[in-house]
Image (spheres, rainbow, N blue to C red):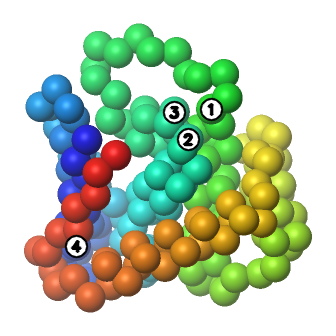
Amino acid sequence: MLLRFTKAPPAAPADTLVCTRTDGTAVTVDLPKQGILPPAAFHYVITTTLGWPDTYFGQLTAPRTSAKKPRADAAPPRQSAALAECLAAEQWGGATDPAAFAAKLATACRRQRVPPPALAPADLARLRAAVREFGAAWRPLNPGQSLERTL
């Protein structure tokens, strides 16, 4: 699966993500600008770092005819959404210690009405490193330039 994140001009309301599936079909998604990384960047980091396949990208990129059941050990999409929300919040307010992050994640999961996922401090460190790597590749792009990743 090829993911192409394309940066729009600063005045544009959204960047763009094109997901090209292995069957050759593609889906295009507008990524509302939020002043930091595109929202889907956090979901990409979660999917690739934690191996959660049935979250944002699992749903978005599955072939239209797929009747695949979620894996028993997969995190529900709402847990991933809560985790993405917490990672994005750190881009605005700075990182906290793992215990404080876990408390924020528990609060976000309560709003989503799901239990918080088990997230070890080492997992959080890997997620943060992956967010930094994505940001280091994204921020210097000029409008119209793209960042490609694979799943």
Residue 92 percent coordinates (x, y): 59, 83
Q: Judge from the rendering whether residue 122 lies leftward or rightward of residue 97; answer left or right.
A: left
Residue 98 percent coordinates (x, y): 81, 72
Q: Earlier in the sequence, mark 1 or mark 4?
A: 4
Q: Disc 4 marks which residue?
A: 7
The label shown at residue 54 is 3
Q: Earlier in the sequence, mark 2 or mark 1?
A: 2
Residue 55 percent coordinates (x, y): 52, 39
Q: Earlier in the sequence, mark 2 or mark 4?
A: 4
Marks 4 and 3, how far apart at CA: 26 Å
Residue 53 percent coordinates (x, y): 50, 36
Secondary element under disc 2, as helix, strand or loop, is: loop
Marks 2 and 4, how far apart at CA: 26 Å
Residue contact between numbered discs 1 and 3, judged by CB atoms under 8 Å: yes
The label shown at residue 52 is 2
Q: Nearer the viewer, mark 1 or mark 4?
A: 1
Secondary element under disc 1, as helix, strand or loop, is: loop
Instruction: Classify mark 2: residues with Cα within 10 Å, few (<14), some (14-19) or many (20+).
Output: many
| Amino acid type, mark 1 | Ala
Residue contact between numbered discs 3 and 2, judged by CB atoms under 8 Å: yes
> Residue at coordinates 47% horizontally, 52% vertically from top-left?
48
Marks 3 and 2, how far apart at CA: 6 Å
Instruction: Classify mark 4: residues with Cα within 10 Å, few (<14), some (14-19) or many (20+).
Output: many
